[in-house]
Amino acid sequence: MSEHIDTPRTGSVGRRGFLAGAAAVAAAAATPALAQSAAASTASATRPNILLIVTDDQPKHTDWAIQKTIGWIADQGVKFTNGHVATPLCSPSRSSVFSGRYAHNHGVRNNAASHSLDQHTTVQRYLKQAGYRTGLFGKYLNSWTLADNPPHFEEFALLQPAYTNANWNVDGTVQTINGYTTNIIKNKTLNFLDKAATDSRPWFAYVTPYASHGPRTPEAKYADTVVPAWNGRPSVPESDRSDKPAYIQNATGTLADGRQIRAEQLRTLLTVDDAVQAFHDKLAALGQLDNTLVIYVGDNGFGWADHGWTAKSVPYSPAHEVPFYLSWPAGGLGSGTVDNRVVANIDIAPTILDAAGITPDTPQDGHSLLTGYSRDHLLVEWWKQGTGGTGPKTWASYVAKDKQYTEYYDLHTDATGAVSGTGQVTFREYYDLVSDPYQLQNLLHQATPQQEQALGIPALAAALAADRTA
């Protein structure tokens, strides 16, 4: 395993018997009575339907745009306050969602390497093999050939990313469909859900709109929507970056840039929110609201000119922290609770398989969120593709609630995800996230060996090295 384990706050209560609703995790320990209650409430439940919604480039702090989503999935489910992705880049992250594995294990280390994913390891393979009806609606994997049907999906409308009048592969037929793609994804998903009225099989719907990815084109009715004012945060744009790596020292993003990106993202997400409400209403009409496990997550975050950076792919919090919500009333997760464990996209596949009663026969790095498992830190990693350009180099990071330690390496990948380079550490960062949550002061900048020892850097470096090879 590539993360250390704290003593669980509760014992596992078995499949679907999550420790009594995750509120207790956020505060302290769940009582045995609560755990027994949760187990009892799910003992007779049939296999749940699965609705997995993955947005594109959606960072935390976008709640204003998704109030209907939060009102359903978080307020009547679980809100994870420490939700992360293990690689802040689209294809590696989505491959981790499918497989429950870190990118260094599933092999999709960059957006060009999508065909390196072992499809046998994916949650859709497990569910389809177990008798689930499976559907994909929206974006799949970057660099995936549109004409290639996505494996293990019975129905699909695969989007070639765009906001309007896009090309699609619909159940094997490549075609252009006019209209706003988030609404097309909504309608395709609703048609898939409707079939539950006559098809008794449980279903898995993977729903993945292009929002809020650039160019961040809003639906026409939201094009001029006024969003709440925003005055930045201490990391925007951070005037003194002399303790940061060269690419951040040279970053040029301004508060005005951050405001524009934020406003555009929020406007595109308003249509996503409408779609999620439509899913809720359809499930209610079908009588399937209670026994549908719904997960909502961003595939990575995005910088609003934090440290001058207006993108993803960096080790700073805005790039790898994401909204992360889960609801499953029949599984005891419908009461609106808060869970402060460190969770990640690698936990999604294990959670789904746990809920469906499926034991994986391929390795997974994540852990079911339906158990009391709690990690003390997470590995977050990213690889540079090719040798050119002025952006970030390959890096890996030890991310805990109270601290973050990052190393950059002389490594790069090719289009298949294969790694080359010396592996030499070229730059390091350490942030005390309690006193410095915006990562303004790299405590390793000009630090003495004695100061490094006091910060516990040797142990952190050893733990990071172990994580990267596990």
Image: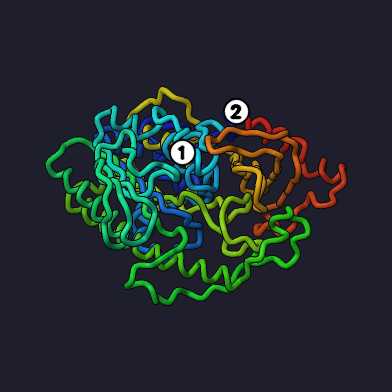
Amino acid beneath label 1: Ser
Q: Which residue is mark 1?
A: 114
Q: Residue furthest top?
A: 361
Q: How is the image coloured?
A: rainbow
Residue 234 percent across, percent down from the top left: 66, 66
* Residue 234 makes an appearance in the image: no
Q: Residue furthest left?
A: 198
- Residue at (75%, 53%) from the top-left corner? 442
Crowding near the residue tagged with mark 2, few <14, some 14–19, many ≥20 C-alpha atoms within 10 Å: few
**Alpha carbon distance from label 1 to label 2:** 22 Å
Badge 2 element: loop
Of residues 353 and 319, the one nearer the viewer is 319
Residue 103 percent across, percent down from the top left: 53, 36
Left or right: 26 as drawn, with respect to 286: right
In this rendering, the label closer to the viewer, 1 or 2? 1
1 and 2 marks in contact (CB < 8 Å): no
Residue 71 percent across, percent down from the top left: 35, 60
